[in-house]
Amino acid sequence: MKRVTQLLASSLVALSVASCGGSDQLDTAPQAVLTEEQVATAENVDALVIAAYSYIGNDHYTAPNFLWPTGNLRAGDAHKGGNGPSDIFAYHALSLYEPLVPDMESFPPDLIDLNDKKWTRNYTGISRVNAALKIINETPAAELPNGNLQSAELRFIRGFFYFDLKIHHKHIPWIDETMTQEDILSASNRDLTDQQLWDKIAEDFRVGAETLPDVQVDVGRASALSAKAFLAKTLLYQAYEQDDLHNVVNINQDKLNEVVALVDEIEASGVFSLADDYAENFLFEFENGQESVFAIQRSLNDGSPDGRGSWPSALNAPISSESGFGCCGFHVPTENFVNAFKTDQDGLPQFDSYNDANYRVETDYVDPRLDHTVAMEGKPFKYDENYIHGGDSWARAPAIYGNFNAIKDMENPECDCRGANGPFPIFSLNTPIIRYSDVLLWKAEALIELDRFAEALPIINRIRERAANSTERLNNASLYRISTYTAFTSKQQARQALRFERRLELGLEGHRFFDLVRWGIAKETIDSYLSVEQSRKPYLVDAKFTKNKHEYLPIPNQQINLSGGIYIQNPGY
């Protein structure tokens, strides 16, 4: 979507020309400001489509679409980092679970309701989509020869925002282009059941899967294949049916079979494949490569005021003069997460004992994906021997959080893709949302739950083989040992291997917590993590995950108030 971003900038400039007047009177209408009536016209539909796309990448660390706060901090894969608990306290609350409250503005010193901010930004994106869809629906088809394609792209984008809302809050109001203002004001977040909401989201992606081309000319636009991927992901989540208290009570076999069929179609297209080297998924020069099914297109110097760079990661770089970054040491991998990459003599994960002792680079065998995911003392930062990680000197509060750095969303300081806002480094490095390896693991998961676990074995092994062949750029002292599985003797063994593989392959990409909730194992997994990590990191002493509550965030209190009390709060809050 690099080209899409440029098109957006030029489209908005073109739209603004007509609004620039020549009068210098005090009562002159603001220049370069358009009313909804001026913009919302048939000839501007493609600009409106692009504007909807742009909102995916118009995110920020206070409301990110790279889900490191809600997907990694809550899963036990990362600590908040920064300068201690009060530095963006709302994210500290995510790590402790119990301090989460519907009115996040009650937290000093931030006084920013980040929960409400994310909710609001998602519905702003949905509003952009609905406004454009309404124009398409009200315009004769002859005047919009590409109307079906534009409508399908818009529904894909709407599905993106609703999926994000759904996995965070579960019960959300459904607002679409057919609703009047009165309908919107009277809509409740309980008008549709949990399963009905999933059906609505799936239908938006289904339209894209049935209408769009397999490959788009403009990189970054939704295609039929990316829509099929999102549809498969939606159906996989929907398959794990939950009761009103978020317990998984059934796994829908029909939905799983459709997931397998959709992934089969994506595979058969031949459009995607695993990158030869795992590293290529997280390097600027390889973005939009063969493994990128859908990514947020980041850009700098694109004509917009601040660029659409990696603002969600603006706080996450190492902090030290020698590192060359500047600020701010957030998103710190946990010891538990790092230990998960240890392997045994046979090169397989240590499922039951990996966290008994902390990883020692001099003696422990390790999966090479660790060094593609985490930077640590004495090792090159992002494959660059000129930047050897300095340990505590590269961390902002090492006594609280440790000194690891997450690196998938980072580039080196000298990268041409780097920008800065004061001390905050940002990059035009894309944010992967769906990688092909993720898609393959959905199929493996569905096959296992369908009792076809022997068919899942070669999928998992294929991903492990790629990891084993991804050491050329690493060049450090780690003892790499990784091998494949010979057979799965039971469904439970296959399930354990699959779930562990997702943690390693997709580590720190924002998926982990939502996986745990989907599988119905968040409580036991997080309790196991805290039982050890609390002794390693005393700030976690008050952390407590409450089952039937913390699987989802609260409905923001501000939204309940604005609804006049129509919205119903999630259980436990």
Image (cartoon, rainbow, N blue to C red):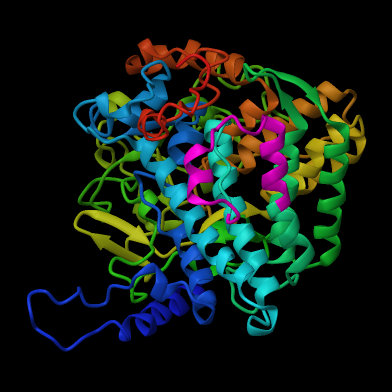
Res. 548 image quadrant: top right
- Is residue 186 highlighted in magenta? yes
Q: Residue visible at 60% across and 63% down? A: 154
Q: Residue visible at 29% across and 82% down? A: 19
Q: What is the magenta range?
A: 177-203
Report if residue 486 is visible in the image: no
Of residue 55 and residue 16, the one placed in the foreground of this image is 16
- Is residue 412 highlighted in magenta? no
Q: Position of residue 243 (x, y in %)?
A: 69, 19
Does residue 297 appear to the left or right of 421 in the view shown?
right
Does residue 85 appear to the left or right of 388 in the view shown?
left
Q: Is residue 561 above or below residue 29?
A: above
Hey, which residue is sitting farthest bottom in the picture? 22
Does residue 573 appear to the left or right of 512 in the view shown?
left
Report if residue 367 is visible in the image: yes
Q: Position of residue 26 (x, y in %)?
A: 7, 75
Q: Residue visible at 57% across and 51% down? A: 179
